[in-house]
Image: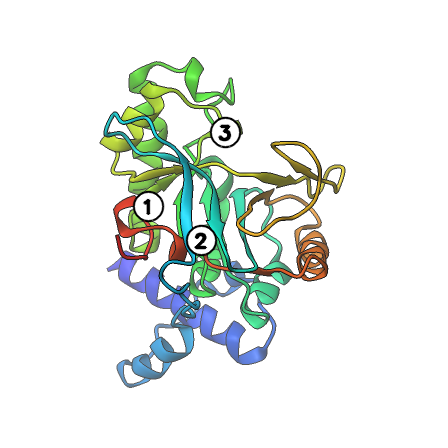
Amino acid sequence: MRGIRLIASCVLAALLGVASGLWPDIRVRMNAPAAHAAERPAMAQVLAPPRWPAPKPGTWQLSYQRHGDGLPPVVDRIATQDKVVFITIDDGWEHDTRFVDIVRTQRVPILVFLTDQAARTGYEYFWALQHAGAPIEDHTMDHAAPFNDMRRLSSSAQHRQICDSADIYARQYGRRPEIFRPPGGSYDQVTRTAARDCGMKSVIVWSIEFYNGLSGRLARMDGGSDLRAGDIILMHFRPGLARDFEHLLTWIRQAGLRPAALENYLPRSLGGKAAG
């Protein structure tokens, strides 16, 4: 019963944020009374995550490393004719409420990779992001501490990092992650085997990083700093997130591009929503 009351309180808290037009501090509202059953259909309609446009068939293909070993492939960008980029955000240390409002009101598709150590003090914050249209995927329990490199962990430790966090997110958000991002983009065959065993269908890295909260620069993995169609952009939940996110959106528009939902360009067989 306690879990049911907690979920109902989260739903009502999010509804209050939507109605006000500004995202409130959900944690303050966690003890709000449960909604009446008659109100639930209207609440579900208001809180339903947005549906992002799907690409036309034949306009894109995956760019990934083909190992031929039956393990989850590693995807680093999408080759597409569409003028789109894909924003992904890692860890979960910063709980910037204005960022949630930007994502929700401006309808910006993002993909979130959570580290449980960072997210556990604000699970409800990421619940709000999920209902703004951001799927929650797996980024380990504690960033593979103390090394920040999965390759330096044993097989059993890598399994714990991926499986335990996936179990937590399944309980918290009602969906078990199917996409894994390794800390620092470092992985080996043991990592991919653990990912498969934990139910992951693909490993997503990135083609360009936005060092938000740090130098504020863009850096391509292949050199340069320009944004290109099909780029998978990495940023992090760091202080100043909302401000830096607005800067990134400006740079994307100036490049003649727009954010798109990565899951719509990823086949269901790899944890996405596209056919194939």
Placement of 13 over or under 174, stated as above or below: below
Tell me the amino acid under the disc marked 1: Pro
Q: Is residue 197 visible?
A: yes
Image mark for residue 235: none
Task: State which quarter of the image contains the N terminus.
Answer: bottom left
User: Around disc 2, counting alpha carbons within 10 Å, would you say few (fewer than 14), some (14 to 19), or many (20 or more)?
Assistant: many
Of 60 and 131, nearer the camera is: 60
Where is residue 138 drawn, in percent x and y?
Answer: 39, 40
User: Around disc 1, counting alpha carbons within 10 Å, would you say few (fewer than 14), some (14 to 19), or many (20 or more)?
Assistant: many
Query: In the orientation shown, which residue stands out farthest toward the right?
Result: 215
Where is residue 182 drawn, in percent x and y?
Answer: 44, 31
Quick check: 141 left or right of 225? left
Tell me the amino acid under the disc marked 2: Leu
| Element assignment for label 2 | helix
**Mark 1 or mark 2, which is nearer to you?**
2
Where is residue 152 drawn, in percent x and y?
Answer: 44, 13
**Mark 1 vs 3, N-terminal side:** 1
Q: Name the residue under label 2.
A: 262
**Mark 1 vs 2, N-terminal side:** 1
Placement of 250 over or under 194, stated as above or below: below
In which quadrant of the rendered view does residue 264 lie? bottom left
**Mark 2 vs 3, N-terminal side:** 3
Quick check: 11 left or right of 195? right
Residue at 56%, 38% (x, y): give it. Answer: 207
Image mark for residue 185: 3
Q: Is residue 120 visible?
A: no
Label 2 to label 3: alpha-carbon separation: 18 Å
Label 1 to label 2: alpha-carbon separation: 14 Å
